[in-house]
Image: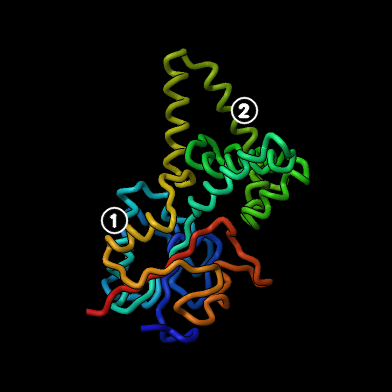
């Protein structure tokens, strides 16, 4: 079925919502980020009965699962959807990133502007898969780059770039506490015997990489469509941030800001139906 308008009888589910959620929805996140958010580890499945929701949505969540775990998670999305229900997915668009990377690479030698674009897009492609600390090299770049160098990053990452900048800024309320904690950690590390120093470093990196921030896989329109088909979805279509099987989608301000700008311009948006038996 197609939903022509926002309707209070429609049951909506927002998975991995972070701080972007709507009171009309059932919102789930690893930690509760508001009174209307249920805390749950989605690695353990989706905590609802079969055929419960008419629309399931998740944005920039799927890439944080391993390739195999992502399939299991999408099967869970299929399970909790009612027949005829809609799944909407947003992920970083690997195809878009790769095309910009290659174009920037070709132009970088002859243009300072393109060289700056190349530096950022290489980070966008790789950093969140390989980083071993919060914010990674992307946060460092945004904190240290000149305004003219930041323009392309802000265009690509939208308001998310501002969040990354705070990782290394002095605006974080716990920055001094975090600095002190790191200093204590370094002193402990120095006092340990050398074999234990390596163990401590490996433990710290491993703990971070299990925190959920890093990307475990990337998707383009073909690979995401393949996963959706494998999980039983039909009528798979690529969308923009504003169009949907659900009219008035934009009114929820999940993929867009109130001013109409796109929240995550680097996104691939796709929708699909759970078939009616």
Circle 1 crowding by C-alpha within 10 Å: few under 14, some 14–19, many from 20 = some
Query: Is residue 57 something one can see in this rendering?
Result: no
Tally the numbered discs: 2
Image-based side of 179 in relation to 247, left or right:
right
Mark toward the start of the polypeptide (1 vs 2): 1
Image-based side of 121 in relation to 145, left or right:
left
- Secondary structure of the residue carrying tag 2 is helix
Query: Is residue 104 something one can see in this rendering?
Result: yes
The vertical placement of 271 against 160, above or below, is: below
Q: Residue at x 56, y 72 (%)?
A: 242
Measure how far apart labels 1 and 2 are at the Cα level.
Answer: 41 Å
- Residue furthest to the left in view is 277
Q: Nearer the viewer, residue 58 or 234?
A: 234
Q: Residue at x 40, y 83 (%)?
A: 2
Q: Quadrant of residue 277?
A: bottom left
Asked if labels 2 and 1 touch by Cβ distance under 8 angstroms, the answer is no
Q: Residue at x 56, y 43 (%)?
A: 102
Image-based side of 99 in relation to 54, left or right:
right
Circle 2 crowding by C-alpha within 10 Å: few under 14, some 14–19, many from 20 = few
Q: Where's the N terminus, which quadrant?
A: bottom left
Q: Mark 1 against mark 2, which lies toward the viewer?
A: 1
Q: Nearer the viewer, residue 15 or 151?
A: 151
- Residue furthest to the right in view is 147
How is the model colour-coded? rainbow
- Secondary structure of the residue carrying tag 1 is helix
Report x, y in % for residue 195. 42, 15
Residue identifier under label 1: 72
Residue 183, numbered circle: 2
Report x, y in % for residue 141. 67, 39
Q: Quadrant of residue 41?
A: bottom left
The vertical placement of 177 against 15, above or below, is: above
The vertical placement of 135 against 48, above or below, is: above
């Amino acid at each position: 079925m197609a939903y022509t308008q926002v309707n209070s009888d429609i049951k909506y589910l927002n998975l991995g919502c972070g701080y972007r959620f709507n009171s009309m929805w059932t919102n789930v996140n690893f930690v509760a980020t508001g009174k209307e958010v249920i805390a749950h580890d989605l690695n353990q499945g989706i905590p609802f009965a079969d055929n419960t929701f008419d629309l399931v949505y998740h944005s920039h969540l799927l890439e944080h699962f391993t390739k195999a775990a992502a399939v299991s998670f999408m099967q869970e999305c299929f399970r909790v959807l009612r027949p005829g229900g809609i799944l909407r997915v947003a992920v970083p668009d690997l195809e878009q990133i790769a095309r910009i990377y290659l174009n920037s690479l070709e132009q970088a030698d002859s243009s300072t502007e393109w060289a700056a674009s190349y530096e950022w897009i290489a980070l966008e492609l790789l950093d969140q898969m390989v980083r071993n600390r919060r914010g990674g090299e992307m946060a460092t770049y945004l904190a240290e780059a000149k305004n003219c160098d930041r323009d392309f990053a802000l265009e690509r990452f939208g308001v998310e770039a501002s969040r990354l900048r705070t990782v290394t800024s002095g605006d974080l309320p716990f920055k001094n506490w975090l600095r002190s904690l790191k200093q204590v950690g370094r002193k402990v590390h120095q006092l340990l015997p050398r074999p234990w120093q390596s163990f401590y470093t490996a433990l710290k990196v491993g703990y971070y990489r299990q925190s959920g921030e890093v990307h475990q896989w990337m998707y383009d329109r073909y690979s995401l469509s393949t996963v959706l088909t494998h999980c039983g979805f039909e009528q798979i279509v690529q969308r923009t941030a504003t169009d949907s099987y659900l009219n008035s989608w934009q009114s929820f301000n999940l993929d867009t800001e109130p001013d109409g700008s796109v929240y995550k311009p680097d996104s691939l948006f796709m929708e699909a139906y759970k078939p009616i038996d």
